């Protein structure tokens, strides 16, 4: 995984340059296109690194949050235009989904055998191919963690204030 992040971080300045010039649609189209190629022709874009071969398959996990973070203020304004009941309902659905999946993974899905494999695939599948369903599960977790941090920000800041200054 470290190989992937080294490559993604090397590409990040180009992505930030595109974002700064307003080319976020082109960036997402390029990432989406590379992801689709990685799903249709998985051997076409693989690196000769044994630990992590298919970088484009996992690129959405790195670059989509980068785009979202870049446009966070505009997204926040647009999100406020959504009716409050719909916002709360969607966030509750994400929270319930995140908690159910976390419990499922913690208990190895004993209540629903095979569900974990269907949702996320095995480790090799997630790390190499990242099919659409595991990618959506990862994105759900990212949104879940975003909600948790937003809700708990004040207590986190009160308890870890100086540490967060160093991290952020």
Image (cartoon, rainbow, N blue to C red):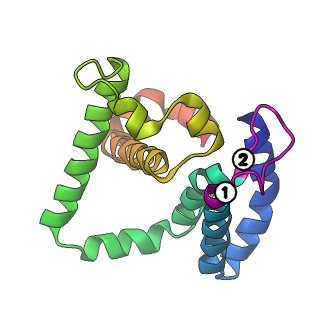
In the image, is residue 50 part of the stretch drawn in magenta?
yes
**Taking 52 as reference, is 73 above or below it?**
below
- Marks 2 and 1 close (CB-CB < 8 Å): yes
Q: Which mark is residue 70?
A: none
Mark 1 closeness class: few <14, some 14–19, many ≥20 residues within 10 Å: many
Residue 95 in the image: state x and y as whole percent. 26, 43
Q: Quadrant of residue 21?
A: bottom right
Kindly give the residue lying farthest to the left in the view shown.
85
Q: Which mark is residue 54?
A: 2
Quick one: quadrant of the C terminus?
A: top right
Q: Tell me which numbered mark, 2 or 1, is placed earlier along the sequence.
A: 1
Q: Which residue is mark 1?
A: 38
User: Magenta residues, as a range?
Assistant: 39-55
Q: Residue at x 41, y 45 (%)?
A: 137
Viewer-proximal residue among 51 and 95: 51
Viewer-proximal residue among 73 and 10: 10
Residue 97 in the image: state x and y as whole percent. 27, 42
Residue 126 in the image: state x and y as whole percent. 56, 38
Q: Secondary structure at mark 1?
A: helix
Residue 144 in the image: state x and y as whole percent. 36, 44
Q: Quadrant of residue 152?
A: top left
Q: Residue at x 63, y 36 (%)?
A: 166
- Work out how far the residue at label 2 is from the one at label 1, CA to CA, in angstroms: 7 Å
Mark 2 closeness class: few <14, some 14–19, many ≥20 residues within 10 Å: many
Magenta stretch: dominant secondary structure: loop
Q: Quadrant of residue 98?
A: top left
Q: Residue at x 84, y 37 (%)?
A: 49
């Amino acid at each position: 995984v470290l190989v992937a992040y080294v490559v993604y971080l090397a590409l990040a300045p180009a992505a930030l340059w595109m974002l700064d010039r307003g080319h976020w649609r082109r960036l997402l189209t390029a990432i989406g296109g590379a992801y689709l190629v990685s799903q249709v022709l998985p051997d076409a874009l693989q690196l000769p690194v044994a630990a992590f071969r298919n970088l484009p398959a996992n690129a959405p996990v790195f670059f989509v949050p980068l785009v979202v973070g870049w446009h966070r203020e505009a997204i926040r304004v647009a999100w406020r235009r959504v009716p409050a009941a719909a916002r709360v309902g969607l966030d509750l659905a994400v929270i319930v989904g995140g908690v159910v999946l976390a419990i499922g993974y913690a208990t190895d899905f004993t209540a629903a055998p095979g569900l974990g494999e269907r949702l996320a695939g095995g480790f090799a599948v997630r790390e190499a191919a990242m099919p659409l369903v595991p990618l959506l599960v990862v994105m759900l977790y990212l949104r879940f963690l975003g909600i948790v941090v937003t809700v708990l920000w004040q207590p986190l800041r009160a308890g870890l204030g100086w540490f967060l200054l160093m991290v952020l």
